[in-house]
Image: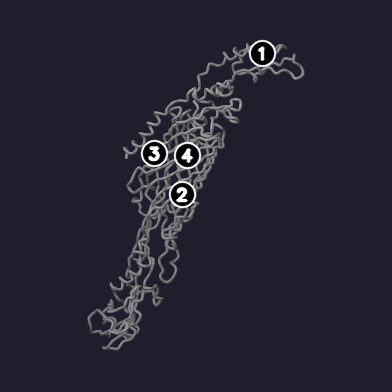
Amino acid sequence: MTRQILGYLAPLSFLCLVTAVPLTAGETGPLLAQNCPTCPQPQYQYSTPSNEYYSPSPSSGDSYIEPTPMDMTPSDSNQSVPPPPSDSPESSQQQSNLNQPELNMQAPDLATPTFNPSVGSVASTAATSPQATAPNMIGDLFGGSVSGTVPLVVDRLFATTSDPILGPAIDPMSPLALTAASMAIDPHPDLLISRTPGGAALPMVPTVPMFPTEFTTVDSQADIVMANPGIVGAVVPIVNNASVEAEAAALGDSIHGHGTTTFIGSESNVVVDSHIAAIEGEYTPTWVYDYTIMSEIAGISNPGGLPGGNVGRQKLTENASPLPRDRVYVNYSYFHNTPLTNAGVHVNRVTPGFEKTFFGGDMSIEVRAPFATTLDSDLLSGTLGDSKSTEFGNMTVYLKALLWDAGFEAVSAGVGFTLPTADDATYGDVFKVENESVHVLPFIGALFLPTERMFVQGFLQADIDPTGNPFSYAEFNPNGPRSPMRTIGRPNDADMIFFDIGFGYWIYQAPLCGGCECGGCPGAPCGHRHGWIQGIAPTVELHYNGTIESADTVLVQRGPSAFTVGNGSQGDIDLWNLVLGVNFDLQSNASLTLAYATPLDSDGEEQFDSEFRVMFNWYFGGSDRFISPPTF
């Protein structure tokens, strides 16, 4: 796996080396050559004086107005008040020209800043300066449970004969077993199979004649006579008939697909219709079988995670930054071949959301509302769930706080919660998993800006299910609808740990431009960049997803037998995904990201074969919250 990671990182490292060139004078020189008074100004915290410090009175050109401290630049504080201007325009112009260089030379001896200062009086920090606003991370995980099989009784079959079977009379002096063979009569009695005793026969192709037909009683003939002195009308238990079971199994296969038959001895018997001692008797046997199929159920490996599992988990890393931001956004993800069924399901997921800062931009709240074209939440719809159903997932809410800000480094932390907004997961009238659990999602994030164009960011997050979801099951009832559902457990979803890290580099930055006076970007504020595409930054991300607590299983007791729903620790995942993307910084405070994800493991734990992702953000906060490429 290490070789694979290095193999993916090597081309990116080479790309970074060959493109790691700072902005040259040639990029901004044409604009600066236009004598734009605004373009160079963002490089310094002070301003240059001008001849606007003198404001002639509208009524008299001879009046003199003394400049106030608000009219002076920082370099004016130690200077004497300039004399009033003369009436001559030439003299006024000469006075202005004489004073201007002198004031400029007294500008504070400040170190050249490494980035553009913030707009207004707000100090530049890693959270607010333009270069700190690296593109959001992209993310990777689908997070649905894998499919599995559960033994479900889907039918009860009653096999009997179309007419009574003629056989020898019951003789208490005979051996323990009573065996009856059909007489050589025409027509022979046929085997009929129905879903209820004496009910309408199910179609069988071909119809099976019961010749010869044998039944064997459980009790001896002597015990039968002792228990039934009148003999006629006696109901006598019988043992299984392998030939009859084979016919019942073939019929069950034709209706439900491959399954197994289980002989129900407590309900299988033979009725003595008539009896002539020492001569003959007429008998109607009935064999009863439960038909059970191993039903494949999407996501059943993790019953506690079924509600919303068809839409997938929501990681904070998906289109998120360690920094609080003001934005609205929409994410689109196409997951190819997710393991919701053995055959794989393609999922199209859309996640609109918004993030809003408060407390001066040091904290934010984010809300996501995913929905997807995926399997229906009723897993019996269609053959194995309708894969063209639009399902609403579990919403998530995140609270984020900026903990530390050191200019080019920042650390944040917070907690998220999933809200049980997805539909309950059902399997017809067999079982239901109610959606009640609220997951807790603590996280910590960090951002580091090692160079003018490079950015590194990452998250460490957990996903914990503290309560689980109620699991209800209904026993099979052959005489009608299944028995009422009863809650038999409250399985917890698997607890997960996520580690995500991303590396990016601005390979293109549009040149800076000013307003209309610069002629470069008419109508754009000074300090913004020229063109619709203002920056391009490729990104590579590595994502680890692992189980820290296995999903719970549910033990279903059915009569003398039982079966387990869920895979437990066999459903744990331990996988790495690689994401390659490119970020476009656009005009109007927007960004567009295109990305491709692929698993680095191939051990059957993959959540998808491949993923394509598109993310669009619009930032509505102040200019310091934009994602513009850094300006050093």
Viewer-proximal residue among 241 and 95: 95
Viewer-proximal residue among 76 and 404: 76
- Tag 4 or tag 1, which sits nearer the N-term? 1
Check disc 4 and report the residue beneath it: 593
Circle nearer the viewer, 1 or 3: 1
Mark 4 crowd level (few <14, some 14–19, many ≥20, 10 Å Cα) = many
Disc number for residue 613: none
- Tag 4 or tag 2, which sits nearer the N-term? 2
Disc 4 from disc 3: Cα separation: 17 Å
Q: Is residue 427 visible?
A: yes
Residue shown at 68%/17% (left/top)?
A: 54
Q: Is residue 552 visible?
A: no
> Residue 479's x, y, as percent?
42, 72
Check disc 3 and report the residue beneath it: 542
Disc number for residue 348: 2
Is 538 situated above or below 311?
Answer: above
The amino acid type of the residue labelled 4 equals: Thr
Disc number for residue 93: 1
Is 504 situated above or below 257?
Answer: above
The amino acid type of the residue labelled 3 equals: Leu
- Tag 2 or tag 3, which sits nearer the N-term? 2
> Residue 384's x, y, as percent?
41, 59
Disc 1 from disc 2: Cα separation: 69 Å
The amino acid type of the residue labelled 2 equals: Asn
> Residue 148's x, y, as percent?
36, 56
